[in-house]
Image (spheres, rainbow, N blue to C red):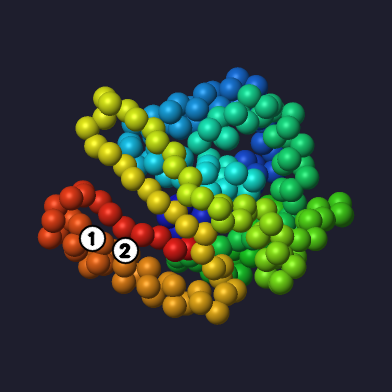
Amino acid sequence: NAVAEDTAEAMVMLSDLVTHPAFPADETLKEKTRLAEQLQASRDNPMNQAFENLTLALYPKHPYGHVGQRIESALPKIQPEILKAYHQQWFHPTNMVVSAVGRFEPSVLQAYLEGLFPKSNAPSPKLPAQWYQRFGAEAQQQVASAVTTSPSKSQQVVDIKPNLAATGLAQGWYAPGIHSPDYLALKVLNTHLGSGMSSQLFVNLREKKGLAYAVGSMYP
């Protein structure tokens, strides 16, 4: 994010960061420590803790569930050599997507990009086949099998913190995905039920009854 007059200098700095990252061991440790502290501090908010618990319970075997405790358990395994290997494998010009918004000349920006991120003769990294099929029926089955099927009985995760003044409550259900014929109807239903300050949940539970400071529903 830079003013138009500094675009050239900003692009040079961006190129250096993207193409020549150092990953020094001391800075990697600092970043891991900072992230662990952020995760711990986020739990001072009861809603953050409630959503973490809910996500872990809903997605025990799916990347959607890579939050909170699972990130913390993985942090010790992240070392500079792993970051370098990941960068070398995936940070490739053919993998890059650029989005630019603001006052600039497209032809000039394209020249910057082509000069700072030249084409490489190295082979492009190959993504797993399911990534290319993610909008097809096969991919939907893969995702459905990765996300656990609806449990035969409800699950409850209770985390009591007597030192907090507020209580956070989160509930979740498995619902049809984006390719379901019911998707749009459920989006409309969610908007009416709990999206925004005019939703039924907000008006009834907060405005009329004063039972909650914040309330809402989400359907991706």
Report the number of numbered marks.
2
Q: Could you tell me which residue is drawn at 38 percent across and 48 percent down?
A: 170
Residue type at mark 1? Answer: Phe
The residue that disc 2 covers is 194
Q: Which is more toward the observer, 35 or 104? A: 35
SS class of the residue under badge 2? helix
Quadrant hosting residue 160: top left
- For marks 2 and 1, the one nearer the N-term is 2
In the figure, is residue 29 to the left or right of 119?
left
Local SS, label 1: helix
Rendered image: mark on residue 202: 1
Task: Provide residue 161's location: percent of width, then percent of height.
Answer: 32, 28
Q: Which residue is pictured at 52% across the width and 59% down the height?
A: 174
The residue furthest front is: 152
* Res 12 seen here: no
Residue under the image location 26 percent in, 30 percent down: 164
From the viewer's perspective, tell me whether residue 173 is left or right of residue 146: left
What distance separates the C-alpha of mark 2 from that of mark 1? 7 Å
- Above/below status of 12 relative to 159: below
Rate crowding at label 1 as few (under 14), some (14 to 19) or many (20 or more) other CA atoms within 10 Å.
many
Pointers 2 and 1 in contact (C-beta within 8 Å): yes
Q: Amino acid at mark 2?
A: Gly
Asked if residue 117 shows in the view, the reply is yes
Left or right: residue 185 compared with residue 177: left
Location of residue 131 in the rendering, given as x and y in whole percent from the top left corner:
73, 61
How far from the left and from the top, in percent, is residue 81?
74, 29
